[in-house]
Amino acid sequence: MKFDLSYTIDALPRLLEGATVTVQVALLAFAFSITLGTIIVLTRTTLNWRILNGIIAIYISFIRGTPLMIQIFLVYYVLPVTGLNLGAFTSGILAITLNSAAFVSEILRGGLTSVPKGQFEAAKSLGVSGFALWGRVILPQTFIASIPPLVNEFTQVLKATALLSIITVVELLRVSQQIYSSNYHPVEILSGAFIIYFLLCFFVSRGSVMLENHWRVRRA
Amino acid sequence: MTLDFSIFVEYGPHLLMGFWLTIKIVIAAIILGMPWGLVLALGRRSRFLIPRLAATSFVEIFRNTPFIIQVFLFYYVLPFYGIRFPAEYVGTLALAAFGSAYFAEIIRGGIDAVSKGQLESARAIGMSDWQAMKNIVLPQTLSIILPPLTNQTLSLIKESAILSTITVHELTMSGMRVQGEIFRPFEVFIMVALLYWGLNETIAILMRKLEKWSKKGRTSNQDSAETLKKEDVVR
């Protein structure tokens, strides 16, 4: 057999359509996971309840200790049994959000330690507390310090979306499977999808440098 | 929904067989991937353009694409060129290739962390590049890269679940088979998750002990080096 590029080129429009779904899923899941991750970090540091901290620690350990694929199965197959029927797309996003939030919260916790203690003290001495303290003083610095690992985490999310093809979310990998199951040219089609994934992740990870520079300029 | 864990009396051995295959595959992937990762790391630091370019593109390509599509490509491309292996071998090979890209980055980071003077002084006393690398730099790298290597091993255990998509009968696959027979997703997948979790936690704890132990040796060495210096000063 020979590698026939015309199959890749013919499939390209549909592959790109699939890629937009991939990007959508990744952006949605990442937005949710940043929100959830921030909430986790805030409850950990401000409330500091022992039971809650214990639950969070077990949650993070579970997420980090088990394959994402099993987590996706747990969300996709178990929730309907309890009467909650979400569909593949929503449960896929939920699974990736729950997975990524654990990592995001660990990243933000690391970023938080890089904020000098003087910032808290200075804000308090100026009478800034509660929402203003966190929303205006601490969290912005935490996020800027965490840009490189957060961008890295976003590429992880981008790659993780490919797993949703198993639970029938029609994203890039699923689209390519649909194409090659009808024309039986898996190598050509998968190579096309492979290159699209590579370009997406590669440019996102290179974008980290740009983001950092952008914020550095605004801060100066 | 009532929970019924008695099903594992009958299906437990099935899961454990899958678990054992997962462990075997990961060990094989590490044995194959670690030396290849070292080759890639040294290739990326090479003076010559072609090995540097080849190693860099290998690492970047494997790090910037989802593992599942790499697995599919291995599964379809090898027969495309007339190479036929059982799915287990293809899966192990894919996992090794994927892991080696990350191992390469870890090893490269470790080499960079060893101070440059070490390499230069080794070269200055007449060692060849390879001798300096083998005798001076790499041994010092080992204790630096132990924690990230552990993390990568844990990550390989988790990624191996994806091999179930190409019909490798490892833990996730056995879980799916059992679930297909008895339709009890919660019990089955929680049990599978617990097996993965337990394995990962055990390795993490063991490696943390090993790290502490290796650091202990190091700091005491440094301490003795420092006391030597102090004695020098006193004298």
Image (cartoon, coloured by chain):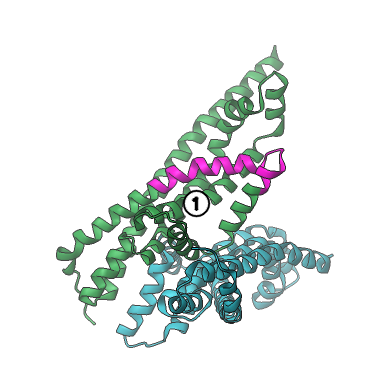
Quarter of the image that includes the N terminus of chain B: bottom left
Residue stretch rendered in magenta on the structure? B28-53
| Residue A82 place in picture, x, y as percent | 31, 84
- Residue A186 visible from this viewpoint: yes
Q: Which chain is green?
A: B
| Residue at position x 40%, y 52% in the image | B92
Seen in the picture, residue B150 relative to B224 is either above or below; the reply is: below
Answer left or right for A22 relative to A61: right
Answer left or right for A9 relative to B172: right
| Residue A62 place in picture, x, y as percent | 40, 63
| Residue at position x 14%, y 65% in the image | B10
Q: Nearer the viewer, residue B229 or A214?
A: A214
Answer left or right for A189 relative to B200: right
Q: Nearer the viewer, residue A120 or B162?
A: B162
Residue that mark 1 sits on: B97
Indicate the secondary structure of the residue bearing disc 1: helix
| Residue A8 place in picture, x, y as percent | 58, 72
Chain letter of mark 1 equals: B
| Residue at position x 21%, y 61% in the image | B14
Hue used for the chain lettered A:
cyan
| Residue at position x 27%, y 64% in the image | B174
| Residue B133 place in picture, x, y as percent | 62, 30
Specify the amino acid type for callout 1.
Answer: Ala
- Which quadrant holds residue B95? bottom left
- Residue A46 visible from this viewpoint: no
Q: Nearer the viewer, residue A12 or B158?
A: A12
Query: What secondary structure prevails in the magenta region?
Result: helix
Seen in the picture, residue A126 relative to B79 is either above or below; the reply is: below
Q: Nearer the viewer, residue A161 or B109?
A: A161
B52 inside magenta stretch: yes
A37 inside magenta stretch: no
